Amino acid sequence: MLQLLEAKEVFSAVAIVLTFIAFGPYILSIWRGKARPHAFSWVIWGAGTIVVAIAQLSDMAGAGAWPIALSGVITIGVAALAFLKAGDTRFLRVDWVFLLLAASALPLWYATSEALSAVVILTFVDLLGFGPSVRKVIQLPHEENATFFGLGALRNGFVLLALEHYSWTTALFPAAVGGACIAFAALILIRRRAVGSPLAS
C-alpha cells in the first residue's frame, strides 16, 4: 500500500513538472506577444479548475488533485496576463453566450450536496470555455500554441495515474479536459495547414 501511494506521488510530481513545462513557455509567448489567448476562455477555465480541485480533494483524490489545483491558480494568472498584455479581448456575442452559460452553471453546484454534481457541472463549464478559443482558432490558428495543449493532455494522463481514489468525481474532469486538449491541439494544426503560413498572407 505504501509503495502504491509513493507511486501516486511520483505521478503527481510528473504532472506538476509537466504543468510548469507547458505553462512556462506559453506564458513567455504571451508576454512577448506571440500568443494571444482568448481571455474569456482562461477566466472560465481558471475558476472552474480551482473548484474542481476542491471537489476532488473532498472525494479523497489525494495527490491527483495537487496538479489540478496548481493548474487552476496558474490559469487565473494566464487570464490576467491575457488582459494586461492585449490578448484576444474581442468579445463577440457568441463569446458572451459561452461566458453566461458557464457562469449560470456555477451557482448550480452550490444547490447540490454531492461533489460529483459539482464536477459534472464544472467539467461542462470547462469544456464550454473552449468555445471562444475554437472560434478564434478557426480564424487565426497561428495565435494559439498546439504544443501547450498537447502537453496539457499528457499532464492530465499523469493526473489520472496519480489519483488515490477512482470515481466519477475524481476522474471525470482530467479525462474530459485531456481529451479536449488533444482535439483542440489537432484543430490548431489542421487549421494552420489549411490557411498556410501567416507570413504568406
Image: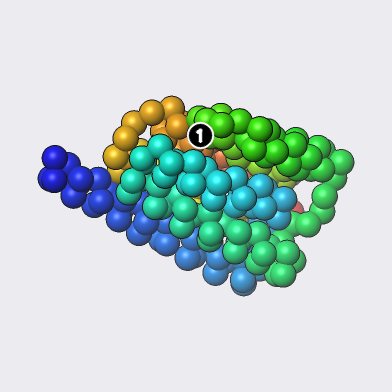
**At 56% across and 39% down in the image, what residue appears?**
184
Name the element at disc 1.
helix
Q: State the residue lying farthest toward the right.
A: 93
Residue 51 in the image, given as x and y percentages of width and height: 55, 46
Residue 148 in the image, given as x and y percentages of width and height: 49, 52
Count residues near mark 1 (Cα–Cα under 10 Å), then give few for <14, some for 14-19, many for 20+: some
**At 53% across and 61% down in the image, what residue appears?**
74
Q: Quadrant of residue 84?
A: bottom right
- Colour mode of the rendering: rainbow
Q: Nearer the viewer, residue 181 or 10?
A: 10
Please say if 161 is above or below 75: above
**At 62% across and 71% down in the image, what residue appears?**
31
Q: Nearer the viewer, residue 143 or 96?
A: 96
Q: Is residue 1 left or right of residue 167?
A: left
- Can residue 174 be seen from the camera position used here? yes
Q: Is residue 49 left or right of residue 137?
A: left
Q: Is residue 129 left or right of residue 186?
A: right
* Residue type at tag 1: Ala
Residue 114 in the image, given as x and y percentages of width and height: 52, 30
Quadrant containing the N terminus in the rendered view: top left
Q: Nearer the viewer, residue 66 or 178?
A: 66
Q: Quadrant of residue 195?
A: top right
Residue 43 in the image, given as x and y percentages of width and height: 67, 52
Please say if 39 is above or below 139: below
The residue at which mark 1 appears reads as 115
- Can residue 140 be seen from the camera position used here? no
Please say if 89 is above or below 167: below
**At 54% across and 50% down in the image, what residue appears?**
50
